[in-house]
Amino acid sequence: NAGVTQTPKFQVLKTGQSMTLQCAQDMNHEYMSWYRQDPGMGLRLIHYSVGAGITDQGEVPNGYNVSRSTTEDFPLRLLSAAPSQTSVYFCGAGQSLNEQFFGPGTRLTVL
Amino acid sequence: AQKITQTQPGMFVQEKEAVTLDCTYDTSDPSYGLFWYKQPSSGEMIFLIYQGSYDQQNATEGRYSLNFQKARKSANLVISASQLGDSAMYFCAMREGGYGQNFVFGPGTRLSVLP
């Protein structure tokens, strides 16, 4: 997976709690992104970054914040967790437009 | 309208046989990329193969090849000599324009390889 790591692997939150999902890559990739995968569906883009200091919204950004202060890290923040945010979250990274590798995923449950 | 269509919710193939997983896409952007990913039951997303819209030849990666028919907007994945370990969900995805601007996944096809 091109050295993309995600922590934690599993997380349970209560409604209203906040938390940060971590994503790191050690391949100096410029491009990083966050997706969510709901049961029986493909991935949907939440936010992405084309380099340190540059982020933008994807298809489903509401309720999430990101920042990219370094090339290596791209954390995803849930501001006030809701049950609708129960999902599996994948972080992606790639050096060019023709590649995107994913981390192992974080399974989040919001009660 | 669906950007990526995978019309086969489930497929079965006999071990050692070849199988084709269908993917059609919809875009008006002349520059785009097509990806296939494998998701086994363990949940990770594994990159398989990439095809750029300007690539003249079909992409190949080991037992995987992409049958790219640009005029038909079709990007089917062909797996040769299926193995039991190929049983998984397979997702077709498309990137339009630059990174992140539009990266969409299809609903997936579940492939089961029979011994």
Image (cartoon, helix red, strand yellow):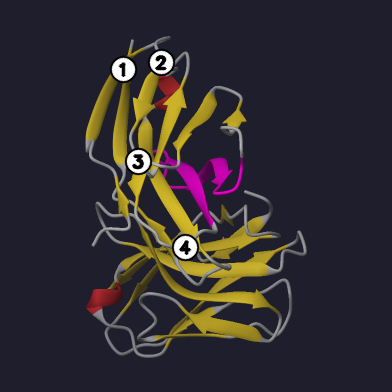
Circles 2 and 1: CB atoms closer than 8 Å: yes
Q: How many residues crowd around disc 3 within 10 Å: few (fewer than 14), some, or many (20 or more)?
A: many
Q: Position of residue B99 (x, y in %)?
A: 57, 67
Same chain, marks 2 and 3?
yes
Amino acid at pointer 1? Val
Instruction: Check disc 1 and report its element: helix, strand or loop.
Output: strand
Residue B55's tag is none
Circles 2 and 3: CB atoms closer than 8 Å: no
**Residue closest to the far front:** B71
Give the alpha-carbon distance from disc 2 to disc 3, as whole Å.
16 Å
Give the alpha-carbon distance from disc 4 to disc 3, as whole Å.
17 Å
Residue marked by disc 1:
B13
Give the alpha-carbon distance from disc 2 to disc 1, as whole Å.
8 Å
Q: Earlier in the sequence, mark 1 or mark 4?
A: 1
Q: Looking at the rendering, which quadrant does residue A60 occupy? A: bottom left
Instruction: Check disc 3 and report its element: helix, strand or loop.
Output: loop
Give the alpha-carbon distance from disc 1 to disc 4, as whole Å.
35 Å
Q: Position of residue B28 (x, y in %)?
A: 41, 62
Main secondary structure found in the magenta portion: strand
Give the foreground label among 1 and 4: 4
Residue marked by disc 2:
B18
